[in-house]
Image (cartoon, helix red, strand yellow):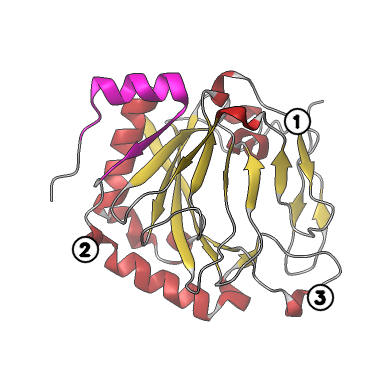
Amino acid sequence: MAYPKATEKDIEFFGEHGWIVVEDAIDPSDLGPLIEHCEEILEKKETMAFDWAWQKGTPREARAFKIVQASPTRYWPEINESPFRAWAIDFGGALLGQKLEFWYDQFLAKPPGNDTPTYWHQDEGYWGRNLIDRGITCWMPFHDVDVANGCMHFIDGGHRSGVLEHFLHEKVASDLLYCKPDEKNAVVCPIKLGSVTFHHSKTPHMTTANTTGEWRRILTQHLKAVGTKGEGDHYPWKIYVNQFTGDRIVPEVRK
């Protein structure tokens, strides 16, 4: 299967809307090793993953793992040699109009019958001002996704409205953040296995809860402009939570 090139139409759409669906982009057969690795993460989630929606008042050893969060490339660096990784960097760079490099990935899995969405947020709200207009994310499912199991939602054109104020969720003990965009321009993006979405680092996005009987499993690939520092120069709402100790760390921020 030949991986597609970004067309002028794709680039124009992304520039206007801040997101795009690329259908039939990934050869599912290229995902085999990645999926096997992520199954291992699920089997050993207590030691290999965090619970992004760790509930307040719940001891670490009793976490429900409503949103499993881990970086497979950190455990298996050879993932960097995968065809889907090189393609995402090239395609994302064309969309953003910048030469990109891989930054980090996240395996995000929601268990069957899960009642927890991933709330509206912007990636730059987490990353800080170091990444202003220098980041893009490729969101890649391991199976078909829709509203029932947690597909992507975007605020159409929301990347042009700046970084919104973000908040810590009162019932969550992790460092999960959320913002409050105007949802009148929200778009829903159910996609099939092999398709992906890209979104600008300022585009507000969310995924719904997984109400089905199977795990919802996806990989995010976060890409940044070559030479850009990692996250930093944070906004006042940013914190880190050490899920081994429960400690909350407030980084140096610029108000």
Disc 3 to disc 1: CB gap under 8 Å = no
Of the image marks 1 and 2, the number of the one nearer the N terminus: 2
- The residue closer to the viewer here, 243 or 120, is 120
- The residue closer to the viewer here, 52 or 82, is 52
Is the residue 162 above or below the residue 199 in the image?
Answer: above
- The residue closer to the viewer here, 173 or 214, is 214
**Magenta segment boundaries in residue numbering:** 5-23
Q: Is residue 173 left or right of residue 38?
A: right
Residue for badge 3: 59
Amino acid at dot 1:
Glu
Residue for badge 1: 165
Counting from the top left corner in percent of width and height, residue 161 is at 62, 19
Rendered residue at 61%/36% (across/down): 122
Amino acid at dot 2:
Ser
The CA span between labels 1 and 2 is: 41 Å
The CA span between labels 3 and 1 is: 29 Å
Circle nearer the viewer, 3 or 1 = 1
Disc 1 to disc 2: CB gap under 8 Å = no
Counting from the top left corner in percent of width and height, residue 21 is at 36, 38
| Picture quadrant where residue 53 is located | bottom right
Residue for badge 2: 29
Of the image marks 3 and 1, the number of the one nearer the N terminus: 3
Under tag 3, what secondary structure? loop
Is the residue 149 above or below the residue 10 in the image?
Answer: below
